[in-house]
Amino acid sequence: MNTVASMNTDELRELYRELIVDHARTPRHFGALDTATHTAEGINPLCGDKLHLYLQIDTNGVINDAAFEGTGCAISLASASLMTDTIIGLHSKAAMAWFDQVTASLAGEQESIAHDKLNALQGVREFPSRVKCATLAWHALRCAINNDTTATKTE
Amino acid sequence: MSQVQASNSGAELNLRDDFPALLQEIHGHELVYLDSAASAQQPKSVIDTVARYQQHDHANVHRGVHTLSHRATEAYEGARDKLQGFINARSRSEIVLTSGTTESINLVAQSFCRPRLKPGDKVLITHLEHHSNIVPWQFVCEQTGAEMLVAPIDSRGQLELDALEQLLTDDVKMLAIGHVSNALGTINPLRKIISLARERDIPVLVDGAQAVPHMAVDVQELGCDFYAFSGHKMLGPTGTGVLFGKEALLDDMPPWQGGGDMILEVRFDGTVFNELPYKFEAGTPNIAGVIGLGAAVDYLEGISMDRIAAHEATLLDYLMQQLSAVDDLRLIGTAEHKASVQSFMLGDIHPHDLGTILDHQGIAIRTGHHCAMPVMDFFKLPGTARASLALYNSRDDVDRLCAAIRKAAAVFA
Ligand SMILES: Cc1ncc(COP(=O)(O)O)c(C=O)c1O
């Protein structure tokens, strides 16, 4: 990442942190999930980003597994990857609490995200045109949990 | 690609200083504006003309006896005359002022085609079209039961002429075709295609949005029936545009919208429409914008469209050559005849990430599907990065772009 530093643009380095680039390049939990109980579609028509989110939620409301498929920029892929990583094993209510934190932070309503990895998304805030890329997966999460079957759009 | 040498022969223009918006820094770097295909910057002469009009001459057109109304009308109609000369239309009646290419095409679809189309008729478009030369035809086909056909392209982004000719059957009641593709830069061989259509009495609409800013266009020489373009891509203000139509066809068409200015006489039992072109210009138009567009025509003609075309051709060759030299960069759209636009992909980096990284180095490009999703589907891409040139760009801009792309590659290395 030395070249980025030499650009002398700290914000850019903030946006394309190693963690983001890593998750974009090798997204975790990428693929379909046969055992899914809840699914949702997220579309960002401006960018052409498209993702399909799968959740397997048990009768107690715990997300036992999560996965996603789709195409998108580094920011949207990394966000989906970090999100699935975070929410597996959480109760859907706890997952929604992260939704609140991430969206509030990206909207500039709160300073940071109280989560080591998710906090990497915070740099996107300096790039208003890219915030929608970062929130796409999260809006799909909300729809999946709420069983809302209409495709979410971040545009 | 043979014209790179020609750049030393005096063909190069140096116009940057005429464009105030270009003289600024973005993220600490001098702006390099390579998104003119989306919308071009305006020269100071256009900005000043609009400001002067707003400050001194504004009133409504065509309806007052007072001095300001007279001045506004003179300037507005003067701009129409300039536009007529700019594309060499036979008469000023053939220049309908619209809000842009989109409105111009919708006007033809609804006012010319809709009354004429029957179930079983065909409208032929091409795979290269911008959404605004697709969707209006889908609407009119749905309304009339006609069918839309699409002429195919090859892997370089060129029309397959034999296939297009085969599609030009008697059932085709309109051929709607772009002059220059906004996504790929392909220049279509219009003279040949229009003559094929005319042999079969098929009317032709040309979407000239990406041609008019970059080359001399002569609608009489082309022989098309309609020609649509936008002001904001040719250094004019947004919300302005032109529909050229052959007088006999326009005469025969019903008005497109009802309102003031498009009528001669209104009674509750009927209305007499105004003469051409006012029949198609209902309501108070974008007066300041059109006057600004007239100033844009003056500016372009002051330089000469042929010199602009030569400058941009040299620069496009240079751009393609320099981009090709970047590791892992793939050019999308490599037609033999091209103008002003180059789409590309850098490795597996998503175009939006590339766009953000370039923006941080002061370089404005467009990323995405460019309102030409069928073209993206053809190349099986979600979108591309696109650098588009205008008369004010230089080799230096191309060099800055390529250096910035190499830095972007390093971010994802
Ligand atoms: C080829 C082409 N046609 C039509 C349009 C639509 O022009 P406007 O949005 O000015 O109506 C554009 C502009 O994006 C274009 O590039």
Image (tube, coloured by chain):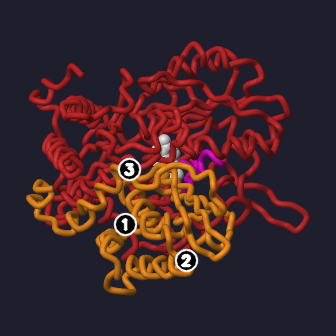
Chain colours: A orange, B red
Range shown magenta:
B96-106
Residue B247 location (% of width, % of height): 64, 37
Q: B5 or B70, which lies in front?
A: B5
User: Callout 1: helix, strand or loop?
Assistant: helix
Same chain? Circles 2 and 1: no
Comparing marks 3 and 2, which lies closer to the viewer? 2
**Local crowd at mark 3 within 10 Å, few (<14), some, or many (≥20)?**
many
The residue wearing badge 3 is B367
Q: Which amino acid does label 3 sit on?
A: Thr
* Mark 2: C-beta under 8 Å from nearest atom of ligand 1: no
- The label on residue A91 is 2
Question: Residue at 40% across / 73% down in the picture?
Answer: B54
Q: B348 or B113, which lies in front?
A: B348
**Is residue B105 left or right of B350 when viewed as pictured?**
right
Magenta region includes residue B99? yes
- Label 3 or label 1, whichever comes before in sequence order: 1
When asked about the image quadrant of residue B22, the answer is: bottom left
Q: Which amino acid does label 1 sit on?
A: Val
When asked about the image quadrant of residue B328, the answer is: top left
Question: Residue at 15% across / 65% down in the picture?
Answer: A9
Q: In this view, does A83 lie above or below B226?
A: below
